[in-house]
Amino acid sequence: MIFYHGSYLEVAVPNLLHSRSNVDFGRGFYVTPLYEQAVKWCGKFKRRGKKGVVSCYFFDESRERDLNILKFDSYSDEWLDFILNCRNGKDTTNYDLVVGGIANDKVFNTVELYFDRLIDKSEAISRLRYEKPNQQACFRTEKALQMLHFERSEVV
């Protein structure tokens, strides 16, 4: 499987040192199987006057059995609970890799409404079901990162 990472520089050797906490799937190195999504991630750097660079990686899916993986196939109660725990710094899970939908601006607005108790969980999930998930994968451990192999990068 091919994954992409959008940044302002080439990331030939991904690491966890620069990862932020309190994001969708917790601290980790974020990639996407969608090239267009990685290009969008570059947009925030380009708006700041930096260049956009998409790095490309190969991940051997046959080695997934060696990892503790959590996959979300859709926006669901479990996805929402996981995102909220991670964003609130309350994630105590030990997943090596988490894969699922991105809380983009529209999704994040729904999550915020739920978080602020302006809508209930069933309303939040109902709204999220109409969103087409953009995919992301968060490599959360060194063990998982060792299975991600840099192939190339390009300026976008």
Image (cartoon, grey):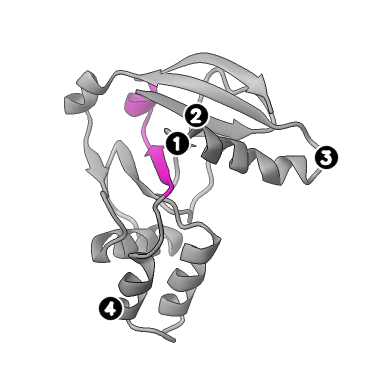
Circle number at residue 32:
1
* Contact between labelled residues 3 and 1, with CB atoms less than 8 Å apart: no
Residue drawn at x 27%, y 41% is 95
Task: Name which of mark 3 and mark 4 comes first in the sequence.
Answer: 3
* Contact between labelled residues 2 and 1, with CB atoms less than 8 Å apart: yes
On the picture, is 129 further left or further right than 150? Answer: left
Measured Cα–Cα span from mark 3 to mark 2: 21 Å
On the picture, is 19 further left or further right than 130? Answer: right
Measured Cα–Cα span from mark 1 to mark 3: 23 Å
**Residue type highlighted by circle 3:** Gly
Task: Name which of mark 2 and mark 4 comes first in the sequence.
Answer: 2
Task: Name which of mark 4 and mark 1 comes first in the sequence.
Answer: 1
Magenta stretch holds residue 156: no
Provide the residue span drawn in magenta: 134-146
Magenta stretch holds residue 136: yes
Task: Name which of mark 1 and mark 3 comes first in the sequence.
Answer: 1
Residue drawn at x 33%, y 27% is 144
Measured Cα–Cα span from mark 2 to mark 4: 33 Å
Q: Quadrant of the C terminus?
A: top right
**Residue type highlighted by circle 1:** Thr
**Residue type highlighted by circle 4:** Ser
